[in-house]
Amino acid sequence: MSRMKATVFVGPGKIELIDKSIPDVGPNDALIKITTTTICGTDVHILKGEYPVVSGLTIGHEPVGVIEKLGSNVAGYKEGQRVIAGAICPSFTSYACQDDCSAQDGGNHGHGYKPMGGWRFGNTIDGTQAEYVLVPDAQANLSPVPDGLSDEQVLMCPDIMSTGFAGAESANIKIGDIVAVFAQGPIGLCATAGAKLKGASLIIAIDGVDDRLKVSKDMGADITLNFRNVDVVSEIFKITNGRGVDASIEALGLQSTFESALRVLKPGGTLSSLGVYSSDLKIPLDAFHAGLGDNKIVTSLCPGGKERMRRLMSVISSGRVDLSPLVTHSFKLDQIVEAYDLFANQRDGVLKVAIKP
């Protein structure tokens, strides 16, 4: 068989499932037969034309699957082995990647200096919403799935879990900190779980959907606030006795959530921004304290590479986090357009969808 089904970006507002050639395997590559993938909020930005990719590109960047064929230089793996690869699949061979990995702040992103340089699946090369995907630099990026873990249990690792946890890691959370997490979609829920693991003693989760706030409790939230019912900024200052939070995590990508996340910070606090923004951000002068608040604003792209994936799956294997409840719907690859419609319009309580070729 030399052909496969693949979901391609046609133009703003349009994707199609087409037949494509199964890619040839180079010496440093691995061909993965996809068993489960999913749709990300970034894919919706691509669909809407808010993030540019070339027409005809296979989209998607969250692979769970089985090794179909290995390149001649890829050692330590075997065909038929269950694996995942991160949404970010760096080479770890460039000067920039190695400099990033050796950073004193615990780098290991491997993105290089070019923004999003390591994000290749569904961005600069064909992605994962297909029957097969070619993983470049497979030696650095393939991570075996431990026995006993289902596809659904590890489906969040390539992007959502890595991104959410990165938000908590970048927020400089210390044991005993108070943390506010704005938006409890899949990434926000993972950020909440990450804040708990980092040692936060009080986590405040904010969203406008009560069902998501209920899930956030399972992820580690201590207090939930529905922004439709309360003035979140005022309420957080009441909860913290006027002190503000040590760290806030923004996980939606809107001016309103970014601004609120900035306003609730204590002097010297950190705003960790995870949202994908589709328009210019403005920083209010008062919330920024005219630049004298000693605050930090940091952004994160999900760390990739096999060691990051191994660590995330280790957290799941230990039972410290269970993200399988985030997978609320399942579709066949043939139903991908229907799945996009559901996910993009956030109907039927959807959090994440499993796409199964």
Image (cartoon, grey):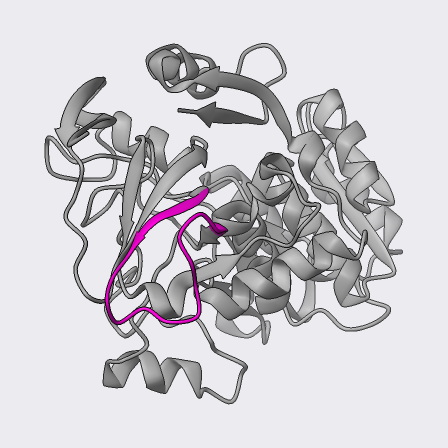
204 displayed left or right of 129 = right
Q: Is residue 69 magenta?
A: yes
Query: Which of the 4 image quadrants contains residue 70?
Result: bottom left
Please name whichever residue, 67 or 265, is drawn nearer the observer in this view of the structure. 67
Asked if 235 appears above or below 341 in the picture, the reply is below
Image coordinates of residue 224 in percent, x first then y, are 81, 36
Asked if 213 appears above or below 162 in the picture, the reply is above
Image coordinates of residue 167 in percent, x first then y, are 57, 58
At x 18% / y 37%, what residue is drawn?
22
At x 37% / y 19%, what residue is drawn?
333
What quarter of the picture does the N terminus occupy?
top left
At x 53% / y 57%, what residue is drawn?
144
At x 67% / y 50%, what residue is drawn?
147
What quarter of the picture does the C terminus occupy?
top left
Is any part of residue 82 visible from this angle? Answer: yes
339 displayed left or right of 58 = right
Is any part of residue 286 visible from this angle? Answer: no
Query: Which of the 4 image quadrants contains residue 198?
Result: bottom right
Image coordinates of residue 130 in percent, x first then y, are 30, 31
Image coordinates of residue 309 in percent, x first then y, are 54, 60
Q: Which residues are magenta?
A: 65-83
Please name whichever residue, 335 or 71, is drawn nearer the observer in this view of the structure. 71
Query: Which of the 4 image quadrants contains residue 325?
Result: top right
